[in-house]
Image (cartoon, rainbow, N blue to C red):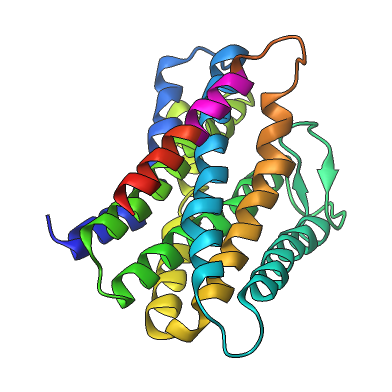
Amino acid sequence: MSPIAITIIGLLITFLGTILGSAVIFLFKKDQKIPEKLNEIILGFASGIMLSASIFSLIIPAIENESAIMPSYLVCAISIGLGALFLFAIDKIVPHFHKGSGKEEGVHTASLSRTSKMLLAVTIHNIPEGLAVGISFGITLGQGGDNAAILSSLMLAVGIAIQNIPEGLGVSLPLFSEGNSKSKSFLLGSLSGAVEPIAALFGFFLAYNIQSLMPWALCFAAGCMIYVIVEEMVPEVCKDSTKHHGVLSFFIGFLLMMILDSALG
């Protein structure tokens, strides 16, 4: 398979993860919930992959890239901070419901329904994930696009797609519980991930055409991803401190991505 074909698959696969997760709603009955243990295992595995990818696929390559402006480690530190601050600002401005607590965050407004705010919450955290995938593929193709680097970028996309499966169901299931049909719940749940390929395309063209921004773009995306992991995923994985299946699956995902990135890179 050509590098361009793999890139197209990579840019779309995260959205397919959301669609797959939303489609699971057809197997559920009203008021049925996602098994907590299964949710923690999936999120733990996905967050491990995403953190490992942030370090080995985004941050380390950026540090190894020489910068004419300042030392590369300072470029990375600033960019990671900017990525985290970017999502923090969006969290504080855009009205949405926090997934873990169910409490409203952002600017309070009565004009948006609870459903709209729930969709906004997912959309906010899908943007940096799409950017990370697009930037990774854009830089890889811009530097020649060897198969090993392309497969490493693909693994990043797969990790995010795995995380999007419970996320898609996490949107469609409450919609179904509120009285919407399964078809409408599936459609809205799927649409919550539509922003990812759009963000991925933006990140791809930016990184592909402006290679000098490579370390800045990689670490900005890493900062956004780490913010999502710590703010959204880790609290879900560690809800019950007496159970460790989510923590163990986190390390499995982290080590698997580290091995794959090192072997393919």
Please identify the residue farthest to the right as the structure is shown. Answer: 108
Residue 100's spot in the image, x, y percent?
A: 75, 31
Q: Nearer the viewer, residue 228 or 171?
A: 228
Please identify the residue farthest to the left as the structure is shown. Answer: 1
Which secondary structure dominates the residues rendered in magenta?
helix
Q: Which residue corresponds to the image point at 70% horizontal and 40% vertical from the top-left?
A: 232
Q: Is residue 108 visible?
A: yes
Instruction: Please state, as top left, top right, bottom left or bottom right, where the N terminus lies in the image.
Output: bottom left
In reply to whether residue 251 is colored magenta, the answer given is: yes
Numbered disc total: 0
Q: Nearer the viewer, residue 21 or 135?
A: 135
Q: Residues in magenta?
A: 246-254
Q: Nearer the viewer, residue 38 or 187?
A: 38
98 up-or-down from 65: above or below: above
In reply to whether residue 40 is colored magenta, the answer given is: no
Q: Which residue corresponds to the image point at 64% horizontal and 26% vertical from the top-left?
A: 178
210 up-or-down from 265: above or below: below
Instruction: Please state, as top left, top right, bottom left or bottom right, where the C terminus lies in the image.
Output: bottom left
9 up-or-down from 101: above or below: below
Rendered image quadrant of residue 107 = bottom right
Q: Is residue 29 left or right of residue 147?
A: right
Residue 123's spot in the image, x, y percent?
A: 59, 52
Residue 239's spot in the image, x, y percent?
A: 75, 21
Q: Which residue corresponds to the image point at 49% horizontal and 76% vertical from the top-left?
A: 214
Q: Is residue 18 visible?
A: no
Q: Nearer the viewer, residue 116 or 99?
A: 99
